[in-house]
């Protein structure tokens, strides 16, 4: 009886929240397949398809008549390069902070992490001037240069958490067997860290897709935009909206990200809290 | 050291350098530290410098004007609104997030049928890039085709049950919904602020749930067993066992939440751009408007620097907290 009540309680709490939290995604999906006649008619029931819906015309429009493919490509380019820069800088730093430098390393680790708290909204004005001064305005390079400023502290912190979970004995054993420290890193530490590194890749990439303020300030040419600003600034013009195409465009990046997040969720938690509570 | 005896004399020196812990550590850490110092420390310093000059768009340096920008910003009524909104936005959304995430984590920690699916739905907003999620909400809160309004004022029961949600709202809540003049979610000053808060909470709740779940999972089974033996169940167990053990991790979630809410610009900018009539301006959007659209870089920088005390307090608390965890 108590078990039954407890179960019911779980549904009573989670179901309403699940409906509200997931509703925008349902609505993106629904809207993306509607025709103009169906969507812009106040007499129509919005939860039904009628007057030519469902249609895939909105997706065709999005990919053939807007610069969405360009923005998607730009996002992928910026994301990929930023992730590489982040790994090059954060991997060695995180390892060293977790392993090699004791209490001093702990404080430095926390200090690096605190810089993650300094928000873009505080830095975008001076950075916009610097970007203009060195001639990077309106170029993807400006984003590639600036984005690691928040991905590196974040990634260093996550990786630090992961490296701390690798038993030190494993490395000691390799060294007793005659491996140098560099070799130990290459053939013992690196292989076990791959899941942690993948987690960092995904979450750093997602930070890039989420960034809005720098992109909005640095880039105004429509061919150099990323999806985070392109949709809002180019597909919403005054009173002319392309709601179906907009919803299709928001849906497309959400699907792969949602899947990846679910796969890597547990590792994210381990790394994020591991840095602080171990 | 074993490696060194095997290697030849020339290689040995090379190895010795890399076996030296201090040296290797510095080499590994330095690039990241230098990069962060240049790209975070540099602009932060520049922001402080700019805020004390009359720099405008097109030039980095201006005449030194001391604290004039801070005073001017403070005297502007829009700034006061923005400051008030930032406080309301941060406090209310954090309260909503903490309560919702606490409830959800508590419900999700027990296994039940379909849990993975409900968890998936609840975590969805976290995976969606917020500039895109906010656009979806812009559509949901549309002035003419808002699905929320449609649901409020139409008979939603199949077969004409004459059940109208707005009647429930009018009867139960202090608000009144007129069916032929439905709420303008983004066009009314109070509602606009509420809409912005709700969307931000929507985005942060999943993240807080994740952190809370990690906190609950870290409570050892022995503690739960001991509580059971001592007869602590339900609310009592929550208050005396789960809550105190979860407090550290909840504090971390809260501190993060405060920073990311107070300094967030995306949600407000996309939903209202600070409107209608500056009624939903935040410090961040007002700094953007003054600095980028208005071209007063100095004053814009000054406005955004009013956020610095919040960051400072949170940073100090986090450092304290980190030390405490280390000691225990």
Image (tube, rainbow, N blue to C red):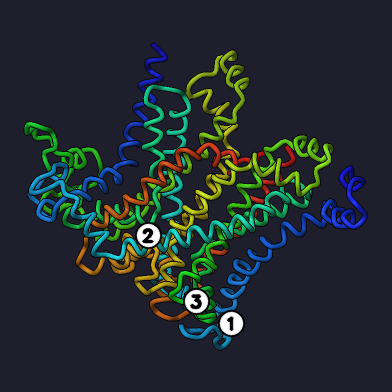
On the same chain, marks 1 and 2? The answer is no
On the same chain, marks 3 and 1? The answer is no
Question: Which chain hosts label 3?
Answer: A
Q: Describe the element under mark 1 as helix, strand or loop.
A: loop
Question: Which chain hosts label 1?
Answer: B
In the image, A95 versus B286, the foreground residue is: A95
Q: Residue B132, located in which quarter of the rendered image?
A: bottom left
Query: Where residue B66 is drawn, which disc sits there?
Result: 1
The answer to the question of whether label 2 and label 3 lie on touching residues, with beta carbons closer than 8 A, is no
The answer to the question of whether label 1 and label 2 lie on touching residues, with beta carbons closer than 8 A, is no
Q: Describe the element under mark 2 as helix, strand or loop.
A: helix
Q: Is residue A186 left or right of residue B269?
A: right
From the image, state whether disc 3 or disc 1 is nearer to you.
Answer: 3
* Screen quadrant of the C terminus of chain A: top right
Task: Using the numbered discs, state the Cα–Cα distance from disc 2 to disc 3 in whole angstroms.
Answer: 20 Å
Residue A228 visible in image: no
Q: Position of residue A76 (x, y in %)?
A: 44, 58
Query: Where residue A1 is drawn, which disc sits there?
Result: none
Q: Which residue is mark 3?
A: A136
From the image, state whether disc 1 or disc 2 is nearer to you.
Answer: 2
Query: Where residue A72 is drawn, which disc sits there?
Result: 2
Residue B28 visible in image: yes
Label 2 crowd bin: few (<14), some (14–19), many (20+), radius 10 Å: some
Residue appearing at x 19%, y 38% in the figure: B168
Indicate which disc, 2 or 3, sits on the residue closer to the N terminus: 2
From the image, state whether disc 2 or disc 3 is nearer to you.
Answer: 2
* Screen quadrant of the N terminus of chain A: top left
Residue appearing at x 64%, y 58% in the figure: A89
Q: Is residue B108 left or right of residue A84?
A: left
Q: Is residue A150 left or right of residue B88?
A: right
Figure check: A193 above or below B10: above
């Amino acid at each position: 009886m108590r078990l039954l009540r407890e179960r019911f309680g779980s549904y009573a709490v989670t179901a309403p929240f699940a409906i509200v939290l997931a509703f925008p995604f349902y609505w993106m999906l629904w809207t993306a397949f509607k025709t103009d006649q169906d969507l812009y008619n106040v007499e129509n029931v919005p939860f039904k398809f009628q007057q030519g819906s469902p249609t895939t015309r909105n997706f065709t429009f999005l990919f053939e008549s807007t610069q969405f493919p360009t923005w998607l490509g730009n996002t992928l380019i910026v994301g990929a390069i930023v992730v590489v820069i982040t790994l090059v800088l954060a991997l060695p730093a995180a390892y060293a902070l977790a392993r090699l430098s004791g209490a001093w390393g702990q404080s430095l680790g926390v200090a690096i992490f605190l810089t993650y708290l300094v928000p873009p909204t505080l830095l975008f004005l001076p950075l916009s001037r610097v970007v203009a001064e060195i001639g990077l305005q309106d170029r993807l390079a400006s984003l590639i240069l600036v984005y690691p400023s928040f991905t590196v502290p974040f990634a260093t912190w996550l990786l630090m958490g992961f490296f701390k979970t690798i038993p030190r004995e494993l490395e000691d054993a390799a060294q007793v067997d005659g491996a140098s420290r560099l070799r130990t890193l290459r053939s013992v530490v690196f292989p076990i860290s791959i899941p942690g590194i993948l987690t960092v890749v995904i979450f750093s990439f997602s930070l890039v897709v989420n960034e809005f303020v720098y992109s909005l300030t640095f880039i105004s040419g429509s061919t150099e935009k990323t999806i985070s600003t392109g949709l809002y600034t180019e597909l919403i013009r005054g009173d002319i909206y392309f709601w179906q195409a907009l919803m299709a465009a928001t849906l497309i990046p959400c699907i792969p990200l949602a899947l990846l997040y679910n796969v890597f969720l547990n590792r994210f938690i381990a790394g994020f809290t591991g840095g602080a509570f171990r | 050291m074993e490696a060194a005896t095997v290697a030849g004399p020339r290689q040995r020196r090379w190895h010795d350098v890399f076996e030296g812990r201090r040296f290797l550590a510095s080499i590994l850490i330095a690039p990241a530290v230098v990069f962060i110092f240049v790209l975070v420390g540099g602009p932060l310093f520049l922001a402080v410098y700019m805020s004390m000059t009359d720099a405008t768009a097109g030039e980095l340096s201006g005449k030194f004007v001391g604290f004039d920008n801070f005073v001017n910003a403070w005297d502007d009524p829009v700034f006061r609104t923005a400051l008030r909104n930032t406080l309301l936005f941060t406090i209310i959304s954090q309260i909503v997030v903490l309560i919702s995430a606490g409830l959800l984590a508590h419900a999700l920690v027990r296994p039940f049928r379909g849990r993975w699916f409900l968890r998936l739905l609840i975590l969805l907003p976290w995976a969606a890039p917020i500039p895109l999620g906010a656009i979806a909400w812009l559509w949901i809160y549309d002035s003419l085709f808002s699905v929320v309004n449609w649901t409020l004022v139409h008979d939603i029961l199949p077969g004409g049950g004459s059940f109208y949600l707005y009647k429930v709202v009018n009867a139960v809540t202090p608000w009144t919904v007129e069916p032929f003049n439905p709420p303008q979610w983004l066009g009314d000053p109070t509602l606009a602020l509420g809409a912005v808060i709700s969307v931000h909470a929507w985005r942060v709740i999943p993240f807080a749930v994740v952190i809370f779940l990690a906190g609950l999972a870290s409570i050892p089974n022995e503690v739960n067993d001991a509580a059971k033996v001592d007869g602590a169940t339900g609310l009592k167990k929550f208050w005396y066992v789960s809550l105190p053990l979860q407090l550290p991790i909840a504090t971390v979630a809260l501190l993060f939440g405060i920073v990311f809410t107070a300094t967030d610009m995306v949600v407000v900018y996309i939903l209202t751009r600070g409107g209608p009539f500056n009624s939903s301006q935040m410090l961040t959007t007002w700094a953007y408007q003054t600095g980028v659209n208005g071209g007063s870089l100095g004053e814009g920088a000054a406005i955004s620097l009013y956020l610095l005390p919040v960051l400072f307090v949170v940073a100090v608390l986090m450092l304290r907290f980190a030390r405490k965890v280390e000691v225990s």
